Image (cartoon, rainbow, N blue to C red):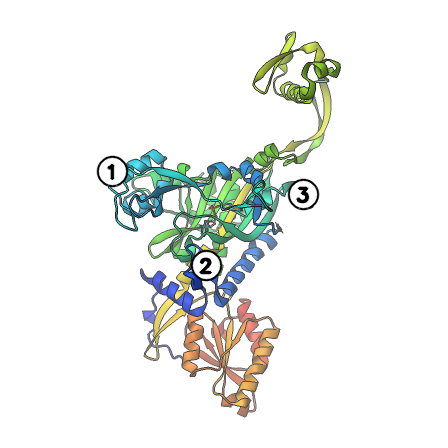
Amino acid sequence: MSERERADDTESATAATSEKLVELAKRRGYFFQSSGAYGGVGGFYTFGPQGAALKGNVEDAWRDRFAVAEGNMEIDAPTIMPEPVFEASGHLDGFDDMLVECPECGESHRADHVVEDNTEYEDAESLPIPEVEEVIAEYELVCPNCGSGLAGQAVETFNLMFATNIGPGDSDPGYMRPETAQGIFVEFPRLKEYARNQLPFGVTQIGRAYRNEISPRRSIIRTREFTQAELEYFIDPETDEPDLSSVEDVEVTLYPASEQNAEDGGEIRTTIGEAVDEGIITSPWVAYFLGVAKPWYDAVGVDMDRFRFRQHLSGERAHYASDCWDAESEVDGNWIEMAGFAYRGDYDLSKHGEHSDDRFTIFKQYDEPKTVERATVDPDMSYLGPEFGGDAQAVVQKLEDLAARDRSAFDGDAVEIDLEGETHEIPVEKTGFAVEEQTEAGEHITPHVVEPSFGVDRLVYTVLHHAYREDEVADEERTYLELEPEVAPTFVGVFPLQNDDELESQANEIVADLREVGLSVTYDDSGNIGRRYRRQDEVGTPFCVTVDYETVEDEETTVTVRERDTTDQKRLPVDDLAETLSSIREGDLEFDEL
Ligand code: GAP
């Protein structure tokens, strides 16, 4: 049986889908702008009951794949961190966007977006500020709010971090973390112990990040508070290699930087294995995680015909990355960045090592102990003490560093060191300089980091957008979300056909049975059955179960089970219902096999 008439008319996303989706999201409780009672505030969204459940399911699926299946640890760090963390990470100095202010209405805009939206430039973010100012003048670009000319306006940098004070007063500044990653990096000295000091190991975190975006836009695509799911994977760059054999056959659409720069460049369809062999993806670790991510995106409901990996152009990369590929989805004709896969090298651990008193290295044991020559100093403190007073210890440190770095500096009678801008000469005989043979069991190395960084909100948006369908059922237009059962907020709706004690009681028993096996169930007894189906279709519930008079009157207790996409209906025994629906949810059984 099917109530659906024109299945072929099913439309996937069209140019106007975003508008319809945002309206549906608000009406059905997916997401809506926060603090509406106070006029709302740009860039902050609340996930309603459906949205929170969908987002939670996506996060669970991410955790299963990137933490559990990969054998990585998960942590949950604070969202506010003290200023020194961001001095070290480079965010205080370098986490900026380009801002241009309208001279007439005073509205602030992202200068690179004004350029990209109104010229043929696709990646204005990578242009230097003077060039952006020139493009604004040359194209006579105007304020998107009031239409006044922006030529001649200074383009400035604007730091995206939200500042706060930790405790009373302003002596202890802190910031809302702009990425969850720093919460992992700063705990590296402890996390490496949990990993028994063995590389490689990975640490994941799913949590909120905050960016004071100049112009938040396109609903939950660019917000000021959002959720990231990040994996920081620590490797020994000399010896660790990923298991590429497990992903080498994964087919991918790639848009490398070279193709973006070429006049007639385009996307390349290939496999992960070939992309590595041909040097298109240079880091095998980045390639490995792209290979893991692609089937995962497919499984949670991203349309693979509207999905690609795009390499960052050199001017576009974040301050910490030496290479980066984005996972992008197509939404209403635009490509949006859902995740970044960056090779961060030793940038973060080195910086935290330099700025803090802790050790951000790992001890790497040699296969066999090595005998090496080491230059050492053993300064005469009875000389340094009276000469340098309170600075004597700093002088010792300088001498140690110099001996390790440049032993030829000790060749003459005196050695030179710089102390707070002043050069001092120290007799070599007072330094205790010597070159000794030492046997070493290993060395301290700074691991490199490979980082798959997923934006959960943009993924939720993509999943909804790619699932949005319109068709006609029983001469009526219908909207439904073809969500994957694994992520759908509600898996099954249960309805008594009419307001009747016997039907209601049977329906409630079924609800309890289904909930007991862990299925997400909603009970609905309001309005006619057609309207109840439409409501569940619109929130993407894969199945509806209707309890009718046959259920309570026939000898064998059966119910009608209706499938969302085809609207096909089958009669199934109540006794097997929980098991059957669970098997479908787990992917072990198809509805049409019943
Ligand atoms: N730790 C690396 C990092 O944060 P990113 O590319 O800046 O990298 C990762 O962010 C992901 O976070 C992006 O791919 C995007 O999905 C999401 N994201 C970034 N800014 C966002 C914003 N303002 N609103 C929603 N999602 C955002």
Q: Give the numbered dot on residue 496.
A: none
Say if mark 3 contacts mark 1, CB within 8 Å. Answer: no
507 lies above or below 554:
above
Q: Quadrant of residue 468?
A: bottom left
Pinpoint residue 26: horizontal percent, then vertical percent. Answer: 42, 66
Left or right: 5, with 171 as reference point:
left
Residue beneath disc 1: 138
Amino acid marked by disc 1: Glu
State the SS at label 2: strand
Residue at the spot x=49%, y=53% of the render?
226
Pinpoint residue 272: horizontal percent, then vertical percent. Answer: 47, 46
Pinpoint residue 113: horizontal percent, then vertical percent. Answer: 34, 46
Sequence-wise first label, 3 or 1: 1
State the SS at label 3: helix
Q: Quadrant of residue 502?
A: bottom right
Q: Residue furthest right?
A: 382
387 lies above or below 134:
above
Residue beneath disc 3: 190
Callout 3 crowding tier (Cα within 10 Å): few <14, some 14–19, many ≥20: some
108 lies above or below 566:
above
